[in-house]
């Protein structure tokens, strides 16, 4: 598989091997040649592999502000490897910026916009391969979904986490600012302290520095075999990251000549490996629906939710990175990162699967060592023996609900109490400030699913942190059809309850004071109301009018599938 970066006598001639090439003098050859000559591309270069650089650069957020520099280095590497780079741009959603509008509804909806953006640019131009610069939460799954859908040679390059700061002698990152903002709402923190924290929390470009959704999904890329070994996590703009960029530029050209495509890599075994990796690092619950979306786009009949259920009993937490544990992402990277986690998991992995290297996972891991087994523990000495992500089912969530438990030994494992119901996060926050949410309550937040939110916008994370700030984190539970930020690991929260309320799921029928029981050991979440009463309520139920019913969000709402299919825009 060690192919040269450019054609050799053993390879087919470019005109036959590359889908981007057309017969010289034909209509498409002529008009493309005219366009590209105007861009300064020599005619002879039009016979070379043409590689898309998928770049979500944006001046809106620090997550993406460095990607133009990364793209420039990648262009050099692609040209040196005998290819012609074409940079394309996509949407660049950042939770803390793009999440301001429509109660956060643009975030998940942007994931699928990215996928379709890529299809239009790359498939429309019939480019030969692509390198995706992955950054904030939704860019990673959006790019993976596009790779699975288009099935052309593709590589993902994690573009690094941001440096965090120090405030008043204590570590300070975006997680503290997020928590602190909601503690201000509940009166547990003063505004001046929050302002001071916000000035120090982010010291460089890159994604949130904890094991939130972005870093979790960067690990998913590598565990799936879609990123080069050793590339996640990595400090943004570090020399190690830039070396990964150069490696990716050389490797994607080889992949084009080898015709190594994503669907040869994205097998059921690869998805099981990725699920195990997420469980081992106590990663973001958002990885569940994102992995399901990638599997759906890859044409696999695979139930990722069931994989998390089944493998959760086998995979302990091996690394406790914030917010699950006490270690920093920098310590995790120094200990060996994703490669070290996979090395510890080898007895459980399918190591026969292919990766973007063209080798098996076994070959990729052969020479890997764990540099700090206290940070990334072996299977027989885990940080926590019980799973960090638990999939629940029951009468309140007949399809699924998801709990991020963190290190379970510290978590309330069973909770039963009366419901107190809200249709918006603002209403829940007002009730909290008025003292209407009391110890023992199960807070029900609904209308925040893929249809009702839409796109799971709804601010459940804000409510969780505000409850924590009010000192009720261990005294109330929360149940919602919305999703949680990857940085949320507070209290007992059942998220992404399905079917969602907007589709008439049981969550829509809950009334104040209805008893709800949550049990992590039996993996159940039940509404303790008899079936006859539920039938009466269902007969009287009418759906709430849709929120934000215009433009892209209306298109999304009208076409989105259920979380069981990854909430993708395909039926």
Image (cartoon, helix red, strand yellow):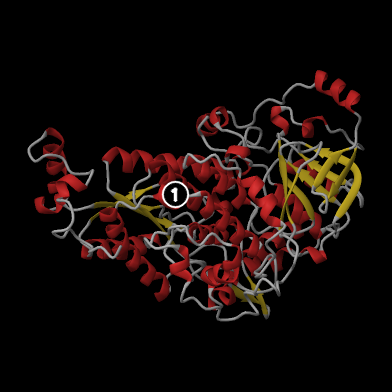
Q: Is residue 531 left or right of residue 306?
A: right
Q: Residue furthest left?
A: 25
Against 311, is 516 above or below? above
x then y, percent, for residue 84: 22, 55
Identified at 85% across, 22% down, the residue is: 535
Whether residue 243 is situated above or below residue 472 in the rendered picture: below
**Which one is in front, 343 or 164?**
343
Q: Residue furthest top?
A: 539
Is 502 on the left or on the right of 114, as rendered?
A: right
Rendered view: 178 above or below 535: below
Residue found at x 75% / y 56% = 465
Q: From the image, tell me which residue sits under label 1.
A: 143
Q: How many labels, in total?
A: 1
Q: x, y percentage for residue 213?
A: 59, 56
Q: Secondary structure at mark 1?
A: helix
User: In the rendered image, is residue 230 in sight?
Assistant: no
Q: Position of residue 512 (x, y in %)?
A: 89, 36
Residue 310 visible in the snapshot = yes
Mark 1 packing: few (<14 Cα in 10 Å), some, or many (20+)? Answer: many
* Nearer to us in this view, 363 or 340: 363
Q: Quadrant of the N terminus?
A: bottom left
Would you identify the image quadrant in which residue 542 lies? top right
Q: Residue at x 27, y 61 (%)?
A: 75
Question: Does residue 314 appear to the left or right of 5 in the view shown?
Answer: right
Q: Position of residue 282 (x, y in %)?
A: 66, 62
């Amino acid at each position: 598989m060690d192919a040269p970066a450019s054609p050799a006598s053993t390879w087919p001639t470019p005109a036959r091997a590359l889908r981007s090439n057309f017969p010289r003098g034909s209509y498409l050859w002529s008009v493309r040649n005219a366009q590209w000559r105007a861009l300064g591309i020599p005619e002879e270069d039009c016979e070379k592999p043409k590689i898309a650089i998928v770049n979500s650069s944006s001046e809106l957020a620090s997550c993406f502000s460095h990607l133009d520099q990364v793209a420039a280095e990648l262009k050099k590497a692609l040209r040196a490897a005998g290819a012609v780079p074409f940079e394309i741009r996509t949407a660049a959603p950042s939770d803390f910026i793009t999440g301001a509008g429509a109660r956060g509804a643009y975030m998940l909806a942007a994931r699928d916009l990215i996928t379709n953006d890529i299809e239009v640019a790359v498939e429309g131009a019939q480019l030969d391969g692509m390198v995706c610069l992955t950054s904030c939460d939704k860019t990673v799954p959006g790019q993976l979904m596009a790779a699975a859908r288009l099935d052309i040679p593709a590589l993902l390059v994690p573009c690094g986490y941001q440096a965090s700061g120090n405030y008043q002698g204590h570590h300070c990152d975006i997680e503290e600012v997020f928590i602190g903002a909601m503690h201000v709402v509940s009166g547990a923190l003063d505004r001046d302290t929050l302002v001071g924290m916000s000035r120090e929390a982010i010291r460089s470009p890159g994604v949130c520095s904890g094991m939130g959704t972005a870093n979790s999904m960067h690990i998913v890329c590598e565990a799936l075999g879609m990123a080069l070994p050793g590339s996640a996590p990595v400090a943004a703009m570090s020399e190690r990251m830039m070396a990964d960029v150069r490696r990716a530029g050389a490797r994607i050209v080889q992949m084009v000549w080898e015709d190594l495509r994503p669907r040869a890599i994205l097998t059921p075994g690869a998805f099981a490996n990725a699920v195990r990796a997420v469980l081992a690092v106590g990663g973001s619950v958002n990885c569940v629906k994102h992995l399901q979306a990638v599997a759906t786009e890859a044409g696999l009949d695979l139930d990722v939710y069931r994989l998390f259920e089944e493998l959760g009993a086998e995979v302990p937490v091996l690394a406790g990175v914030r917010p699950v544990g006490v270690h920093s992402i920098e310590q995790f990277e120094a200990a060996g990162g994703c490669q070290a986690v996979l090395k510890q998991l080898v007895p459980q992995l399918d190591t026969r699967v292919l990766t973007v290297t063209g080798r098996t996972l076994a070959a990729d891991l052969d020479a890997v060592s764990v540099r700090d087994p206290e940070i990334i523990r072996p299977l027989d000495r885990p940080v926590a023996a019980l799973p960090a992500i638990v999939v629940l089912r029951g009468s309140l969530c007949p399809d699924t609900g998801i709990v991020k438990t963190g290190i379970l030994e510290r978590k309330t494992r069973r909770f039963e109490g009366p419901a107190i119901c809200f249709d918006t996060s603002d209403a829940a926050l007002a009730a909290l400030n008025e003292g209407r949410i009391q110890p023992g309550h199960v807070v029900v937040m609904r209308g925040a699913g893929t249809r009702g939110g839409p796109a799971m916008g709804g601010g459940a994370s804000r409510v969780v942190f505000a409850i924590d700030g009010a000192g009720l984190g261990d005294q109330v539970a929360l149940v919602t059809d919305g999703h949680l930020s990857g940085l949320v690991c507070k209290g007992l929260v059942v998220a992404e309850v399905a079917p969602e309320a907007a589709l008439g799921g049981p969550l829509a029928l809950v009334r104040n004071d209805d008893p709800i029981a949550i049990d992590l050991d039996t993996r159940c979440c039940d509404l303790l109301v008899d079936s006859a009463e539920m039938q009466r309520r269902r007969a009287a139920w009418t759906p709430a009018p849709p929120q934000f019913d215009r433009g892209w969000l209306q298109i999304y709402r009208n076409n989105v599938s259920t979380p069981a299919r990854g909430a993708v825009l395909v039926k």
